[in-house]
Amino acid sequence: MSVIVPCFNEALNLRELTARMLRVFEVGGLRGELLLVDDGSKDDTAAVIQALSVEHPGVVVGCLHPQNQGIAAAWRTGAVAARGELCAIIDADLQYQPEDLLRLRRALYDHSVDVVQGWRSAVGRQRDQRYHLSRGLNHLLNGVFGMDLHDNKSGFVVCAREVLLDLLTFEGRYFYWQSFIMVAAHAKGYSYREIETIFEERRQGKSFLEGAALKTSARSLVDVARAAWEYRVKPPPPDVARQFLQRHPVEDRTPPKSATERRRFDAYLAVFNQTHWMITRDVEHYYETLLKTQWLGHRETRALQDEKLRRMIRHAYRNVPYYRSRMQALGLRPEDIRGQDDLYKLPLLSKSEVRQHLYFDILSENHDKSQVLRIATSGSTGEPFVCYADRAQLEFRWAATLRAQEWTGYQFGDPTVRLWHQTLGMSRSQVLRERADAMLSNRTFIPIFELSDDNLDAMVRVLEEAAPVLLDGYAEALDFLGRYVKERRPLSVKPRAIMSSAQTLPLASRRLIEQAFGCEVFDKYGAREFSGIAYECEAHEGHHVVAEGYIVEVLKGGQPAAPGEIGEVVITDLNNTCMPFIRYRIGDLAEAMDPTALCRCGRGAPRVGAIEGRVQSIIRGTDGHYLPGTFFAHYLKELDHAIKAFQVIQEVPGAITFRVVKGGRFSREVLEEVLATFRRHLGERMRIEVEFVDEVAMVRTGKRVASVSRLGIDFQREEPTMVRPSL
């Protein structure tokens, strides 16, 4: 613990304070240090601090302000110099009792909160003018900032060093910012607890407030107005990365937007809330932060991840019974997880465990349900899966996607074409908002679930008319259209870049797509649980992890895989507080890369190499219809009540086998509706054999493959060519 003490003309109090503080360290069994910050004192305070630091080397540390800068500046000086994991702030006048620090520290750990404040008990306090002015200010702070603390302005606090540094990062100009330390904690989303403490009258020295109580009160009212603007009227989203940048500034090497691009983006954001559901224009804050954090070095990026990890672990232990019970069973507390090097102490989380605990204890107990979105997926596994994401995480995902798109050379407002999943599972209002957003962002949709010989040429014409800078879509759909373009319909207008997602992109498929469309492919690795997890940059040297949002482990035999080795992908989500994913086994395999090696692009985020686990498949229907395998996962994800797991296999043209593991509410009516939908997309003459099974077999990645086509598509032949399945 580092105890920070601002000192202004406190020479007569420091020896007793030091003696009592050293006794606190001894009784508490703490490795402690006492940082005495002389804030421009006019008495012998500096000399006393110097003498104490000589008497207690390495324990008493002196810091000097030649001119008086105020309490908040003294706190900041001490916090920067501090070496302890925990920081405490206390006055030098011994009105607060040093011994109470052990109670505050105990409460911090027992309740797993971010900040503990000692509030001044009324026992023995003199009810003078200063007392009543202080009580009035407390009521004012509680009312203005929507809080309910006994002693909001008390500066007797214990928290992690990084938390204190964050609280001390503010923008406004204040007379006495120290009155707002708990307001800052509240506004920035920290959890806190207050403990009643004994407060005695000053015995030696004079307070700077003596004789100036009314003047100080008037200035405090000015400060309240400034703080209301900073913390209540214009509060930024509780973005740890943005706060981290204020303490670790970095050169932003992102090319600036032109005036036209800026105006276009601002106009788009002006109506953002009307064209989206759940997320708001707070995405702008995340986007602007991500443009800067991408240039952090490797060490700084890891420090940011570790800070967010510590926050997430504290939150999960405090508010998510699932994690609390498992950590307690292992004898772990949040303070045992200091960073990624300690992740091995925590158990892995499987999909089956999420399913089992979803409605029991894996959701946060303190989340606002109006700010949470239900996400359903069956992905490539064929087994429907439900999870939840909060608004802040969804806004972060949107911003991270835009940043990665810009790595391709795209700028917002450039024409894009998206191979779209269409409106399956969307309400009418959501469809309207999606269409409006597409219009405002200059995006054209190609409905990829309507592939057929009759409309392929029309789709290519739409692509040419849009003249996109960026084309994005499922890897299997891009591969399919690439084959068509290459063999039947060369493009007259080519995109500048392609972003591929959803399935593995083998080298042969990448080359085919690049040759057909005449541009580079940028691969995206993502999942419905997280959206984009890692993206290729212009250097194409692996996939940059969205490090501000995720920690990605590549494990072999439970240990970190060596660079070049293939291992299991395990993901920790650093943002989604409503349903934390900590060490989640997503079911993919990936090539590990050296985390300290810097990419040629200069970005410091760690990278993963080639991804395995999501096989491309195009199902060939009748009457010239084709259907990406993604369709089945997308359509059936909302039918998990009736179909627990599924697999679609095609061995011969015009027929598929639909393997079904029945859900608890399976009915023949649901099955008939599903088969009718299949035939609408595959042709009415499509033969569908239904097999009811107890389970769907897994492949080596640990996943169940949802759709498998053993037919090759060749547009120059009448009949499909048989090819080996790539499982």
Image (spheres, grey):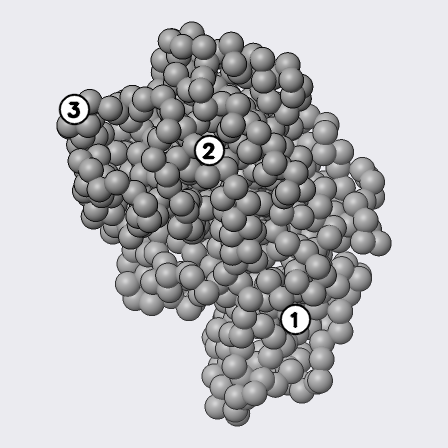
Q: Label 1, on which residue?
A: 352
Q: Label 2, on which residue?
A: 89
User: Cα distance, mark 3 to mark 2?
Assistant: 25 Å
Q: Give the residue at x 20% y 38%.
A: 128
Q: Is residue 107 above or below residue 322?
A: above
User: Cα distance, mark 1 to mark 2?
Assistant: 45 Å
Q: Earlier in the sequence, mark 3 or mark 1?
A: 3
Q: Give the residue at x 51% y 9%.
A: 47
**In the drawing, does residue 197 fall left or right of residue 103?**
left
Q: Amino acid at mark 3?
A: Lys
Q: Nearer the viewer, residue 430 or 469?
A: 430
Q: Which quadrant does the C terminus fall into?
A: bottom right
In percent of width and height, residue 348 lies at 70, 59
Q: Amino acid at mark 2?
A: Ile
Mark 3 neighbour class, 10 Å CA radius: few under 14, some 14 to 19, many 20 or more: few
Mark 1 neighbour class, 10 Å CA radius: few under 14, some 14 to 19, many 20 or more: few
Q: Earlier in the sequence, mark 3 or mark 2?
A: 2
Q: Nearer the viewer, residue 338 or 481?
A: 338
In percent of width and height, residue 706 lies at 65, 68
Q: Nearer the viewer, residue 172 or 238?
A: 172
In percent of width and height, residue 383 lies at 62, 72
